[in-house]
Structures are given as structure tokens and as C-alpha cells.
């Protein structure tokens, strides 16, 4: 179990729980396992893997992450009810280190309108649930949901009740992103003065007013020693405090905060990239720390300064956060060992058959692309290994497009439920022709909500990465595909989205 250290910040990552609640950020089981391994490599102290009682999918994810994670504490969220706590304990059974995180709202508006409970009933419920959780697990965290709109004295009473029943960490969330930095810090100081110093005080700040990171940092100065964060700040509504921003503030301004953490900062960019690939959402160019512009200098004066001495305009260097220096990693003659080592460094542990699949894909890519970078390799792994089992798989694709006045045409062969199907279609453009041919071959007609293309590395031979979002019958799914031929990448992305949609239908 993690104990309080007066100068160290515990990083509690909730990318797989609160982050996954963000619109469009759903991950399947293998993606969650892959992300959990990356978080472990990044060095987070706690991984909140899900909310085990919320459904069989979440239960499986918490159980699978518990089996996979080597170093971090694995945690499951649970409401303050016995059944939830029992499900959490069951899902965590194989975790090397485990935590149950239980929560109940303490603000007047939540107690009256959501819970329909009086304050003394809330206290009784906390008492019963935390006592039960402590019998199931040594490490119990209690959160006062909507703490920032709670009466401070009642919040303290709820926290003291939880501690008396065995809670070791008290989390003070700004659930609706309402708090201001000095105000939330004062709330933490108020609680700190009234709690045993051995109890860890945690903060969990949402970003509705853009203050998630500022509120988190302010609370450290008032005695909070755990931060609940997500990679790239994904989370409910406007998201949560971003892990990379909190960590780099502590790192770059160590002189100011005088606090330590256990994060391997060079794994920050790989973690953000992996998440972005998995959820099919690009990182905004101007995103602090991990955006494409974070280390780009446009003005001549800035460029000249940086060339003379990077410290003129850079408060941190790209390599500190693991931004790739465009190093060529592999080529046509790379062997299994090189690929396995490279992948292990990138947080992917694959079995020998999976390595063979990736090696074959590297060789195919090396036939058409001269230099293969980390990002190319990662895209191949996601294509070859982490695609969900394909109900619809692309076998062949041919596209014709010219400026002769004839419409673009796509001809394709798909495997649909194991049977070969061929189709052809015209379209307004080549992508439209391909998607129409896929619709005819699969008998589906989803609405295309979003289509975006990204180049994985530089150069005209770079792999294109296409992300699509589709919807059908009130269900949405994101799909991703990568290929040196952008039309082929589009077809893969569209099929990937259809496969995810079909998986959701099966699960429902
Ligand atoms: O925002 C919130 O209050 C939460 C709790 C469940 C910790 O996510
Ligand atoms: Zn939250």
C-alpha cells in the first residue's frame, strides 16, 4: 500500500475510468490492457481500471488489467453499496497491489435532488460501505463527490467517518469543474488541519472552466499529496486535469513546488500518442507538452534564439517528454529481436506469433517506404494485433479516379462473416466510392459523422492514418486505419468502425 510521503505526489491515473467516460473515448478490452501497460511503464502509482459493477465489460477490464499490471496499484471504482464493493473486490482478485475507491456525494444539491437522502443517512451509508470495503481490501479510498460545492464542515465529517472506518486516502473532487484555485486549496488546507497526517489527501479536478490543472497544483501547496489525472486530460465533459501538464509543472518548476513524483517523463509523449491512436482522437496542435506545436518555433527571432541557446525560448526540451527525434528505427533487414526489443521499449509485450505478424507487416511496409520510424511501427502493431476480431475484413481493393468526367469507381472484395463478397460502386470521390461499395457488400448504411486524415510521419511516402466516426441506430463507433495508400487506409478505418459497431450490437 502507498503511504504518505510529505514531499512526493502520488499519481492516480483515471484515463481508463473517468477518461473513458469522455464522449467517443470508449476502448475495447485489448486496448485497455495495452493502455494499462503503457501507464505502468509511464510510472503512475495507481491505475483506476474501471467501475467493475457497471457491467460485464468493465468487470472484465478491471480483472484483465489486474492480471497484467506489474508495478502500479490497480483500483476499481464502486458506489457505496455492498454489491458494488464486492464486484470491485472480485475483479481485483489477481492484482499484485489493489485499491477500492468508493464515493458518495456530500453537496446539498446532490444529496437532496440526486440521492434523496438526509446528511445523517449519507454518513451512515459511508460508514457501512467503507467498513465493508476495508474488510475486502487494505487500501480504501473514499471520495466526497461534488466536494467543491459541499459545506466544508459536513465534508470534513464525511471524511472523518470514512477514516474511522478504514479509508487511507480521502479524495476531494471538483466534480463539476466549479472551484477556483485558491478556494479549492483552502478547502484542502481546512481538511488537512482536521485529519490525521498519515491520511493521504487527494484532488480530482474537472476542467469545465479550464482550471483542472491550476486547481490541482494549488492544492499541492495546501497539503494534497495525490492527484487524480488522465492522459491528455480526457474525461467527462471538458475533461480532467491532464497528467502531462501536472507532471511537467512539477518537473520544470521543481524550484517552486519542491515536490517529487515517480513519472518517467520520457514516456509522456508515447503515452499520449498511444491514447490518441486508440480512441481515434487527434491531439490538438496547441496542446501543452504533447501537441505538434508545443516545441515548434515559428517566428524568426525565436528560431534564431533557440539555435543560439534552446533555453532562450524552451523551458523544457522535447526529449524530456519523449518526443521522437525522427530516428529511423527499422528497415527491410530488421529481424525479430530488433522488433521485439523496440516494441518492449515502447510498452508492447507481444508473443512470438504476434512478433511474426508485425515483422511481416514491417517488411511489406519497407517495400514501399524507405524509413520506418517508431510511429510507423506502432501503427502496424495497432493494425495487426489490436484490431478487434474482424467480422468484416478487407481482402482486395481497387480504385480508379481520373479527370475525364467519369465518376471515381471502387471495386473490392471483403470477407463478411467468413464469406467472400465482391462489390463495386461509383462515388463523388474515391473515398465515397469505397464507402458505398463497403455499404453494399455488408448491407449496412451508417452515417459518416467524422473523417480525418493524418500523416504518421513526414514525407510523401508516409503512412496515412485515417480516423472515422460513424453512427447507426443511436450507436456510434470510431475506426482507425493506417496504410501508405490513403484510400486503403480509409477503407480500413471504415471497416474497423463497422466492426466496432457490430461488437457493440452483440454486447447490447
Ligand atoms: O468527478 C468525480 O466526482 C468523480 C468521482 C467518482 C471521484 O469522478
Ligand atoms: Zn471525475
Image (tube, grey):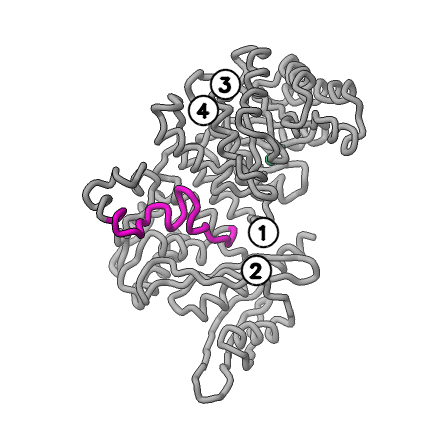
Point out the frontmost of discs 1 and 3: 3
Residue identifier under label 2: 469
Precedes in sequence: disc 3 or disc 2 = 3
Give the left or right position of residue 369, taking residue 150 as reference.
left
In space, the residues marked 4 and 2 are separated at their CA atoms by 37 Å
Are dots 4 and 1 in contact, CB under 8 Å? no
Residue identifier under label 3: 223
* The magenta segment: 279-303
Residue identifier under label 1: 24
Q: Residue furthest front?
A: 301
Q: Would residue 147 be seen by someone viewing this image from the given angle?
A: yes
On residue 9, which mark appears? 4
Above or below residue 332? Residue 234 is above
Precedes in sequence: disc 1 or disc 3 = 1
Precedes in sequence: disc 1 or disc 2 = 1
Instruction: Tell me if mark 4 has few (under 14), some (14-19) or many (20+) residues whose alpha carbon lies within 10 angstroms of its own.
Output: many
Residue 497: name its quadrant.
bottom right
Precedes in sequence: disc 4 or disc 1 = 4
Front residue of 210/357: it is 210
Location of residue 367 in the rendering, given as x and y in whole percent from the top left corner: 30, 67
Q: Secondary structure at mark 2?
A: strand
Front residue of 21/87: it is 21
Location of residue 415 in the rendering, given as x and y in whole percent from the top left corner: 55, 70
Precedes in sequence: disc 3 or disc 4 = 4
The residue under the point 70% across, 22% down is 129
Above or below residue 52? Residue 502 is below
Are dots 3 and 2 in contact, CB under 8 Å? no
Are dots 1 and 2 in contact, CB under 8 Å? yes
Instruction: Tell me if mark 3 has few (under 14), some (14-19) or many (20+) residues whose alpha carbon lies within 10 angstroms of its own.
Output: many
User: Is the distance from the Cβ of mark 3 to the nearest ligand 1 atom less than 8 Å?
Assistant: no
Amino acid at each position: 500500500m502507498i503511504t504518505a510521503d510529505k514531499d512526493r505526489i502520488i499519481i492516480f491515473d483515471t484515463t481508463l475510468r473517468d477518461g473513458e467516460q469522455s464522449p467517443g473515448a470508449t476502448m475495447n478490452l485489448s486496448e485497455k490492457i495495452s493502455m494499462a501497460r503503457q501507464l505502468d511503464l509511464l510510472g503512475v502509482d495507481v491505475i483506476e481500471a474501471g467501475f467493475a459493477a457497471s457491467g460485464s465489460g468493465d468487470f472484465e477490464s478491471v480483472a484483465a488489467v489486474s492480471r497484467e499490471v506489474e508495478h502500479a496499484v490497480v483500483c476499481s471504482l464502486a458506489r457505496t453499496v455492498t454489491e458494488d464493493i464486492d464486484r470491485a473486490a472480485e475483479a481485483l482478485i489477481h492484482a499484485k497491489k489493489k485499491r477500492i475507491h468508493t464515493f458518495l456525494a456530500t453537496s446539498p444539491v446532490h444529496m437532496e435532488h440526486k440521492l434523496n437522502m438526509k446528511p445523517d443517512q449519507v454518513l451512515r451509508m459511508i460508514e457501512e460501505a467503507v467498513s465493508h470495503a476495508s474488510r475486502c481490501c487494505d487500501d480504501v479510498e473514499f471520495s466526497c463527490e461534488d466536494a467543491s460545492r459541499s459545506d466544508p464542515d459536513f465534508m470534513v465529517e464525511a471524511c472523518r467517518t470514512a477514516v474511522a472506518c478504514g479509508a487511507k486516502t480521502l479524495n476531494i473532487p471538483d466534480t463539476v469543474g466549479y472551484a477556483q484555485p485558491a478556494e479549492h486549496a483552502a478547502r484542502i488546507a481546512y481538511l488537512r488541519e482536521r485529519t490525521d497526517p498519515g491520511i493521504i489527501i487527494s484532488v480530482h479536478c474537472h476542467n469545465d472552466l479550464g482550471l483542472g490543472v491550476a486547481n490541482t497544483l494549488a492544492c499541492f501547496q495546501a497539503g494534497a499529496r495525490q492527484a487524480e489525472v488522465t492522459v491528455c486530460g480526457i474525461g467527462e465533459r471538458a475533461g480532467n486535469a491532464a497528467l502531462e501538464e501536472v507532471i511537467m509543472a512539477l518537473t520544470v518548476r521543481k524550484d517552486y513546488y519542491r515536490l517529487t513524483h515517480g513519472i518517467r517523463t520520457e514516456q509522456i509523449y508515447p503515452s499520449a500518442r498511444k491514447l490518441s491512436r486508440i480512441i481515434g482522437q487527434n491531439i490538438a496542435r496547441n496542446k501543452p507538452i504533447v501537441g505538434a506545436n508545443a516545441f515548434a518555433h515559428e517566428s524568426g527571432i525565436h528560431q534564431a534564439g533557440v539555435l543560439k541557446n534552446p533555453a532562450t525560448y524552451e523551458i523544457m526540451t522535447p526529449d524530456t517528454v519523449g518526443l521522437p527525434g525522427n530516428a529511423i528505427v527499422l528497415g527491410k533487414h530488421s529481424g525479430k529481436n530488433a522488433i521485439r526489443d523496440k516494441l518492449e521499449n515502447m510498452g508492447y509485450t507481444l508473443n512470438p506469433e504476434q512478433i511474426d505478424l508485425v515483422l511481416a507487416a514491417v517488411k511489406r511496409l519497407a517495400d514501399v517506404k524507405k524509413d520506418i520510424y517508431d510511429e510507423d511501427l506502432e501503427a502496424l502493431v495497432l493494425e495487426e494485433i489490436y484490431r478487434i476480431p474482424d467480422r468484416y475484413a478487407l481482402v482486395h481493393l481497387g480504385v480508379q479516379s481520373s479527370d475525364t468526367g467519369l465518376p471515381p469507381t471502387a471495386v473490392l472484395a471483403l470477407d463478411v462473416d467468413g464469406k467472400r463478397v465482391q462489390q463495386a460502386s461509383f462515388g463523388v470521390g474515391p473515398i465515397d466510392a469505397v464507402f458505398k461499395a463497403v455499404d453494399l457488400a455488408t448491407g449496412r448504411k451508417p452515417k459518416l459523422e467524422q473523417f480525418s486524415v493524418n500523416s504518421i510521419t513526414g514525407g510523401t511516402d508516409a503512412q496515412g492514418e485515417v480516423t472515422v466516426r460513424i453512427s447507426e441506430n443511436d450507436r456510434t463507433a470510431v475506426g482507425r486505419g493506417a496504410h501508405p495508400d490513403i484510400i486503403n487506409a480509409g477503407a480500413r478505418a471504415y471497416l474497423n468502425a463497422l466492426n466496432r459497431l457490430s461488437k457493440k450490437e452483440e454486447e447490447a
